[in-house]
Image (cartoon, coloured by chain):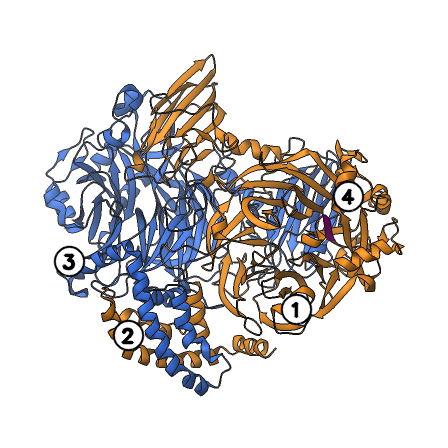
Chain colours: A blue, B orange
Amino acid sequence: MERWEKQKRGSQIRWSRAVVGLVLIAALFMVLLMSCSDDEADTGEGAAPSAVSGDAAAIAEARGLTPDDITAALKTYTPSGVHDDYVLFGSGGHSGQVYVVGLPSMRILKKIAVFTPEPWQGWGYGAASSMEVLEEGFVNGNPLTWGDTHHPALSETAGDYDGEWLFINDKANARLAVIDLRDFETKQIVKNPIALNDHGGAFVTPDTEWVIEGGQYAAPLGWEYSSIDNYAEDYRGMVTIWKFDREAGRLVPEESFAMELPPYWQDLCDVGKLVSAGWLFCNSFNTEMATGGVESGNPPFETGASQRDMDYMHIINLDKAIEVAQAGNTFDVKGFPVISLDTAIEEGLLYFAPEPKSPHGVSIAPGGEYMVVSGKLDPHTTVYSFDKIQAAIAAGEWETDVYGVPILDFDDVVEAQVEVGLGPLHTQFDDKGYAYTSLFLEPAVARWSLGGPYADLNEEPDWSLVSKIPVHYNVGHISTAEGDTVSPDGKYLVSLNKWAIDRFLNVGPLLPQNFQLIDINEPGDNLQLLYDMPIPDGEPHYAQIIKADKLSPWEVYPEVGWDPHTQSPSPYATLIGEERIERDGNNVEIFMTAVRSHFTPEHVELQKGDHVTWHITNVEQTYDATHGFTIPLYNINLSIEPGETTTFEFDATEDGVFSYYCTEFCSALHLEMTGYMFIEP
Amino acid sequence: MERWEKQKRGSQIRWSRAVVGLVLIAALFMVLLMSCSDDEADTGEGAAPSAVSGDAAAIAEARGLTPDDITAALKTYTPSGVHDDYVLFGSGGHSGQVYVVGLPSMRILKKIAVFTPEPWQGWGYGAASSMEVLEEGFVNGNPLTWGDTHHPALSETAGDYDGEWLFINDKANARLAVIDLRDFETKQIVKNPIALNDHGGAFVTPDTEWVIEGGQYAAPLGWEYSSIDNYAEDYRGMVTIWKFDREAGRLVPEESFAMELPPYWQDLCDVGKLVSAGWLFCNSFNTEMATGGVESGNPPFETGASQRDMDYMHIINLDKAIEVAQAGNTFDVKGFPVISLDTAIEEGLLYFAPEPKSPHGVSIAPGGEYMVVSGKLDPHTTVYSFDKIQAAIAAGEWETDVYGVPILDFDDVVEAQVEVGLGPLHTQFDDKGYAYTSLFLEPAVARWSLGGPYADLNEEPDWSLVSKIPVHYNVGHISTAEGDTVSPDGKYLVSLNKWAIDRFLNVGPLLPQNFQLIDINEPGDNLQLLYDMPIPDGEPHYAQIIKADKLSPWEVYPEVGWDPHTQSPSPYATLIGEERIERDGNNVEIFMTAVRSHFTPEHVELQKGDHVTWHITNVEQTYDATHGFTIPLYNINLSIEPGETTTFEFDATEDGVFSYYCTEFCSALHLEMTGYMFIEP
């Protein structure tokens, strides 16, 4: 705790940082000046001697860098052309997208378009490979052109990230998306048939056979109208278990099912692993079944849903639930099979354990032995034992909730409670027997020690608070390197902060979020804040961090004429010399090629009223030789990566002269990569 | 040139960097170890002694940092909570947005939604303040929901950035947008009435009375159908001069006009300043009037438009053109006044100077004396003298092009040519009498010395190449701090590179772009590459860099109930206690408040078929206390910053139970900030 106090003081007393900086830097300047020119000479290399001698110290002094700043700079700076060690996949929150960030540099390497059209990537601006995916996610023909992405989940093999697939949910409309990490593009969006919002997803089973999507706000299943007066009878929670076909790279709705749950608001889930494999754990809040109505003198949800001391951790026998569903012991909601609450109780699929109220997230320890839950309004984090849970279930003695769900005795299933601080929220793990819990209200991240099989990995007493580090500000989730796997790496922790306030230059009333990179590599009381990274987009809820060498994306598509949606050769592939325009009545089909730096054909003649189907093949196989394509007024923009064949369609409703052109700067003569489309009235 | 060779070698021989690093870092380690613990003790501060002693050296060694890497790290690292010195406004290319980046940290502080809907900012997902702006940019009712942003222009006062407004064009549809830097939000989009694409914009006059939008690919004015066979007769170029009303914060189409130009493809422009104030300069290419048609055996545009040795710099007497337009000496295209080519010639508004072929950009020196042009296929940069241009015009002797436009004699108007290298593209200036030209083909940035009034600012001979620094890769535009003003700051240069290739981890076939930060603060042969910054979005064409302290955005809106579109109090402002739902037949109007952490009302009861108008006021005045708002299935998402009142409308077409909720994490009880909308069938 000493360091915690120090750091807190340090961040408050800015001038003292400056003093430390000046004194230390003066020293640094002197000693470097004495030593480094000789060393320079030894190297025989032409770099200016000043580069590491007096210059470095003078720079640090001029910029007011403290000793900690200097080490942080050296730990994060990633020189020109050098690659990062880890890749963070972060939800883009209400941007609807996914962010790809390199660690330790904290540079954004990519934004993956998922639920929201994004013209740079040609996502949702004409290209069939995107339009079909987005349209899968529409409901009753209502376009849904954004999402609220929350929890990205990397695919796993034997409980370890395998770098092949990424899943992400849309809380705002209860949808799941599948991203292929060969080309970092979204391949599928599925709409949950029985709910309009979700939260507890995505989470995968240890071999990614199933993907979990938990619900959030209760509603009648299938969201059919029913008065709020019927809340207890008609409103329900849910969790949906999606089958994933890894070969096809698609979720399979026909082999998926849901479980009806009481109308408590289910929150985050986590899937058991190793000893707890085959089980699923989900949080809940509002077990009060508050129905709001502040305008009528009722307590608002924020207080109505915070009355009881305990909510319920949902303990689900996933393997058995799958058997029950596969046996057809379900009922249908909008054609989708649902295991009823009664069946779940009868078959022993669902148990509750009391949990401190309004928790956000249940985190399974690497070996699967412990489930960690933090009630946001309780300063403790609570550790449940899987063995104890199994024993309590086997003992068969319990009370039930109003729906008849067994409630295990709190004291029977809890292994430990650790007082971590104010507003504990989410827990992650490392390779040294430590857990880390975010503290929304302090705000800080707490390091604490695990017991049991993790006890010997560090020197601290079991189940004890080790250290804290302040974060800025109001941290939600945290993510450690490989943190959700059976073998976390430790090394780095990223704090996903909700408020940035004064951390960055003022850019108007809407501020960026703030990711902070923390060095967790040293044991004990050594936690160092390395980097503030503004995230200029939707609120990033959660992230997973994978070792970079586990990813092996394609540099270019495997062959010229590739359809990225099917990940197979396109029937419309067009090679040089095969370009043509075919007319059949009012239907015109164009087969075009793109190469640095021209399109063929350069003239396209149409009649007003034509229906146009247009295929473009980027015949390049050079890394980074992407071409864009746009036609004014028709709201079309494509990104055609090397080898890709893309197709779009439109009706020629506006006549005139239109210049199509390449939107991705591709060569010195890129501006000349253009052509004319003529639409005769 | 010595350093240029060194740097080139350094980047090729990676192992030698490592050797230098190891040796120097060993020295750094030793000397720091000896000196720093004493200094630590002197400070009385609790920071660990190791933080600047052995640790720093060990870290650098472990990470393979070279001496140059270490200084670059210290020059760019911006400690937690410390603010950047400069702000770069970069076009987001075909993302349709604008990026806001802090220097020297190169962190993205914000993305400003402009032409493309963006749900994080609530831009285009229901909020009237965004829908109205986006709809202004639609054509004939055709939604245009993206743009190809190219050239941001900060507003100026007396030729200096004043930090008040930002303008950006959409090349893909010939539109201009106005962004208010009080809240970093887009306030207006205007569609060019006579053209479907643009390129030479935005550029502002020294007091921002006028904003320039130059054309790109020639077409009949108003884009009316005409066969390509009529190219010389019917197709035309253009430049449009938009009046800006600074008080209203709006471009004024009624006081704006265009000039008809020959069907050469006008490219970038720049506005004269100080001695050349009142004049406008634009590039062009394809003065060959090539019409393409590679599919018919014609040369493709890339070669057809590169036949002649010279294209034409357009020299426009802007002040006089404004007089002519205001006198009504125009013709109408789609109701928009256009000065005809004949009038322009008669009135002496338009002159040509030959320029090396296919240039990209004309850059005016800080004092306005020189116009710098680089033909991409010529290794020289060409410097024109404004005085010589004036003298040549006064002399009145010239040839004309086929349209009768006077062509000044090249030798009469050129001041100097400097051989800078392969593929020169764009030039910027600093405070030391240097110019910088990007070299697309090498790729590199060249520093060269100016003459005339700038000669005494540095030691190098006038008009001579001073140094080069390689960039990675294929640089398009460059931007120096305050580089387009009458008083550039120098210090930093950002190289906007088009290809990233191997600079970052592979993230699939679509790569980020690469911004590189270069230290240009030292004179002579000292240019240091400081930072590679991936830009994970549309191709960033151009950027302007402003001193951070010139910006003074609002932290929250000036009063509760603010309409950000009109920047005035909203008639729908709702305070606590004023919340209500009013029904008039099928029209329902809702007045809601949002505060941490509940909406009032929490129940909204509707009938299927209702038309709903919904106002939400965020009654907070706390910095960063933004609330989001979404309703499932209705594709609505709002960002309601502190004080904002926002309005959206929809028809209740889908019945059922819908949970609306806050999409921006606002408090520990954020998840409870929700309510139910019931739509009875």
Badges 4 and 1, same chain: yes
Q: Nearer the viewer, mark 4 or mark 3?
A: 4
- Mark 2 or 1, closer to the camera: 1
Distance CA(mark 1)–CA(mark 3): 73 Å
Eyeballing the image, is B613 above or below A131?
above
Image quadrant occupied by the C terminus of chain B = top left
Q: Nearer the viewer, mark 4 or mark 2?
A: 4
Q: Residue B320: which numbered mark, if any? A: 4
The chain that hosts pointer 1 is B
Q: Are marks 4 and 1 in contact (CB under 8 Å)?
A: no
Specify which label sits upstream in the sequence, 2 or 1. Answer: 2
- Count of number-bearing discs: 4
Mark 2 belongs to chain: B
Reading the image, the residue beneath label 2 is: B36
Query: Within 10 Å of the Cα at label 2, are there few (<14), some (14-19), or many (20+) other Cα atoms?
Result: many
Disc 3: which residue: A451
Where is residue B118 drawn, in percent x and y? Answer: 50, 41
Please provide percent x and percent y for residue B132.
56, 31
